């Protein structure tokens, strides 16, 4: 089973790697797209073909704006793609969908970054077009991977497993940064070539190695009875899961008819939206992912403009936010596993997030202190964000209402993450507008408002989740 | 196959260029004067021969000397394409009114230039080691690189490139050793073979390994 997990880990980190690669080669790309801007007033550097041959953009600033636009375009098409690929993932074999998604998006990366450079074909519209396609294709990754993970890990262990697993995205970020930076000196086209090829290879490996669900091996569906595949080679995950399993075994939803023989029918999109909790969590996630992504993308820029720290330093420092998010996701996931409740953990974390955002906006010009507050902010914002997008999505897609009768996992994940990515895409635009028009302080107030909105959307879910506990404390799993 | 094609194409282009250049040699009637620097150059250089008004080095057919003395040229034809190989150029005794600077861009080898007396040396006097004004001609000798000239605005080259002379008064920024491509951003060459070798073997190994340990047990539903 650890191998199953590994292959999924590889898959998602590779997708993330290719995304991160793009942000790392931005400087090289904008260099390639512009003529030399060595003091336009003074001398023009000769020979022309070497220094001023490319006039796609007059200067680095407009190239940067275009690259920012590409980011936004990517996020929007990624969001739209998530809705679609979730639906597809539930209907077709997820192994094929994942393989197709990874390989084809690798090809678009190759065409975008490498082929255009080799052919010296520079065209803004073509770049936009390729990036939209890439966003759509990359979106196949998340819902399918979460669905596969959800198939393998029961509800009780999900919080922790997903929390740990969200570290993969960061591993991917580091891998992407490493791959890109190590070949960047040969030219940015090789950064694209390498990440595209590695991603393509990952797709091939997934095709040969991925078992999408225990059912494929003739094992009973997880959901509850993880112990059933104890005969599989398992390493670190095994004890944790079986431990939780005992707690879980008396849960009311664990009684379920074995459905190994029935071929589940996929759930409809509208039907999936109407599942309890899906819509509210989607909206909550839209607000939260907006804050989370904006932090992720704008933090280095904020640091270098506000505190005048060097860009490389700001880049390195902003990793602390990621680290906070991973720790937060894991610990909060673990706590929510123990509590058998996720929304109260989310709510507490979000209340703390508002406080830490307020604190961070007043952070002094001091690197260790700033990194510390950043880590805390990451803990309280990145943590819940990771949890909603993975563990909670998986819970929602495998809740009692759909259990056994249909496949909803990928569709629900697609809806939650798709709405979230829409929010993130909008946030990219809004942050740049607010930052230009008002000031960074207002950006933070905007973040606080969004976090507060997330909290509002969560409140009905807490009430719903806690009502049975209040009603019948004897049944509470906290007692166990 | 492709390489052969490229070679054929290149030799065709070179041949065409050489032919074009040779036309310059017949531009003016008569042969090179015996007192001309071009004659002297040709006798000094081994293997070089006089063709019309030119001194040509047979390997590649580059013109290394051109004497257009007393040719009634009133305008230097921009189509008159000379290469960096030219060492000696004599256009004195011609009714030239002014000289187009750009004509000399790229003529890095030029070390002796004879002009009509009314025209100053291209790139200014500081571009040459010695400028002699005679009765009706001006002789500019030994180009000075504009790169390490003091006093004037120092030529700054972008990262990874070095300043190099590019004809009298001109400079260019050439990629430093090991750098290449647009803006000299690329360093070295990507080890394509090694990369694909490693990637392919890792992919195949992992695929086989995972197939055997994972998917072999899969029952077709």
Image: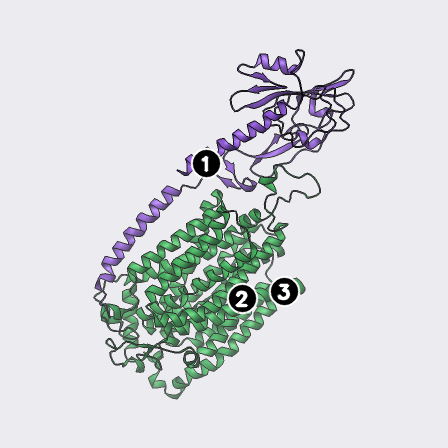
Chain colours: A green, B purple
The CA distance from mark 3 to mark 2 is: 13 Å
Q: Are marks 2 and 1 in contact (CB under 8 Å)?
A: no
**Crowding at mark 3 (Cα within 10 Å: few <14, some 14-19, many 20+):** few
Output the chain of dot 2: A
Which residue corresponds to mark 2? A425
User: Which circle marks residue B6 in the picture?
Assistant: 1
Q: Secondary structure at mark 1?
A: helix
Reply above or below: A391 against B91: below
User: Are both tags, 3 and 2, on one chain?
Assistant: yes
Q: Nearer the viewer, mark 1 or mark 3?
A: 1
Residue at far bottom of view: A471
Q: Tell me what residue is drawn at x 46 percent, y 73 percent.
A: A346
Is A124 situated left or right of B69 in this image?
left
Q: Tell me what residue is drawn at x 35 percent, y 66 percent.
A: A161
User: Which circle marks residue B135 in the picture?
Assistant: none
Res. A272 in view: yes
Which percent across, then down, holds residue A33?
57, 49
Q: What is the quadrant of residue A441 in the picture?
A: bottom right
Q: Secondary structure at mark 2?
A: helix
Output the chain of dot 1: B
Which residue corresponds to mark 3? A433
Res. A335 in view: no
Pick whichever of labels 3 and 2 is earlier in the sequence. Answer: 2
């Amino acid at each position: 089973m650890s191998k199953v997990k590994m292959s999924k880990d590889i898959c998602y980190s590779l997708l993330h790697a290719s995304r991160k690669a793009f942000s790392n080669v931005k400087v090289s790309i904008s260099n390639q797209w512009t003529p030399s801007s060595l003091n336009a007033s003074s001398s023009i550097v000769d020979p022309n073909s070497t220094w001023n041959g490319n006039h796609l953009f007059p200067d680095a600033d407009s190239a940067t704006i275009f690259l920012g636009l590409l980011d936004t375009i990517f996020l929007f098409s990624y969001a739209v793609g998530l809705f679609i690929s979730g639906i597809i993932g539930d209907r077709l074999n997820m192994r094929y969908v994942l393989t197709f998604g990874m390989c084809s998006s690798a090809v678009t990366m190759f065409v975008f970054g490498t082929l255009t450079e080799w052919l010296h074909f520079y065209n803004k519209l073509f770049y936009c077009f390729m990036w939209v396609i890439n966003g759509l294709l990359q979106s196949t990754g998340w819902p399918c991977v979460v669905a596969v993970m959800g198939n393998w890990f029961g509800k009780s262990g999900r919080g922790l497993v997903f929390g740990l697993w969200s570290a993969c995205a960061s591993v991917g970020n580091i891998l992407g940064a490493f791959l890109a930076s190590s070949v960047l000196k040969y030219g940015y086209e090789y950064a694209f070539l390498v990440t595209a090829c590695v991603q393509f290879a990952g797709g091939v490996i997934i095709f040969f190695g991925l078992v999408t669900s225990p059912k494929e091996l003739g094992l009973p569906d997880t959901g509850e009875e993880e112990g059933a595949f104890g005969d599989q080679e398992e390493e670190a995950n095994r004890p944790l899961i079986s431990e939780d399993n005992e707690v879980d075994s008396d849960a009311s939803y664990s009684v379920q008819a074995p459905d190994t023989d029935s071929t589940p029918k996929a759930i409809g999109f509208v039907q999936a939206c109407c599942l309890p909790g899906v819509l509210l969590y989607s909206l909550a996630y839209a607000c939260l992912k907006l804050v989370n992504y904006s932090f992720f993308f704008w933090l280095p820029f904020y640091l270098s403009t506000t505190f005048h720290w060097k860009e490389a330093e700001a880049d390195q420092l902003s990793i602390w936010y990621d680290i906070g998010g991973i720790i937060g996701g894991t610990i909060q996931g673990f706590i929510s596993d123990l509590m058998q409740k996720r929304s109260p953990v989310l709510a507490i974390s979000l209340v703390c997030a508002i406080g830490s955002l307020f604190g961070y906006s007043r952070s002094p010009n001091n690197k260790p202190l700033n990194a510390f507050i950043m880590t805390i902010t990451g803990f309280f914002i990145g943590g819940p964000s990771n949890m909603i997008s993975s563990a909670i999505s998986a819970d929602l897609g495998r809740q009692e209402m759909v259990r056994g009768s249909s496949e909803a996992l990928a569709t629900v994940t697609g809806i939650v993450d798709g709405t979230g990515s829409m929010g993130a895409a909008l946030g990219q635009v809004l942050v740049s507008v607010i930052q230009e028009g008002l000031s960074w302080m207002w950006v933070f107030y905007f973040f606080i408002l969004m976090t507060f909105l997330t909290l509002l959307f969560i409140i009905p879910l807490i009430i719903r989740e806690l009502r049975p506990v209040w009603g019948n404390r004897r049944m509470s799993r906290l007692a166990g | 196959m492709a390489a052969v094609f490229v070679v054929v194409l290149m030799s065709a282009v070179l041949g065409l260029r050489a032919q074009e250049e040779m036309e310059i040699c017949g531009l003016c009637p008569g042969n090179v004067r015996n007192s001309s620097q071009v004659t002297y150059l040709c006798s000094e250089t081994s293997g070089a021969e006089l063709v019309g008004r030119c001194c040509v080095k047979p390997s590649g057919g580059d013109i290394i000397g051109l004497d257009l003395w007393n040719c009634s040229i009133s305008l230097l034809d921009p189509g008159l394409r000379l290469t960096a190989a030219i060492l000696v150029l004599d256009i004195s005794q011609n009714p030239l009114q002014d000289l187009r600077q750009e004509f000399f861009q790229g003529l890095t080898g030029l070390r002796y230039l004879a002009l009509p007396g009314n025209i100053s040396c291209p790139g200014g006097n500081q571009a040459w080691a010695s400028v002699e004004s005679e009765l009706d001609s001006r002789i500019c000798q030994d180009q000075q690189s504009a790169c390490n000239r003091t006093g004037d605005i120092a030529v700054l080259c972008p990262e990874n490139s070095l300043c190099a002379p590019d004809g009298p008064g001109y400079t260019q920024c050439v990629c430093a050793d090991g750098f290449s491509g647009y803006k000299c951003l690329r360093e070295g060459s990507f080890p394509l073979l090694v990369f694909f070798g490693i990637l392919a073997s890792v992919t195949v190994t992992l695929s086989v390994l995972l197939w055997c340990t994972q998917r072999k047990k899969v029952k077709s539903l």
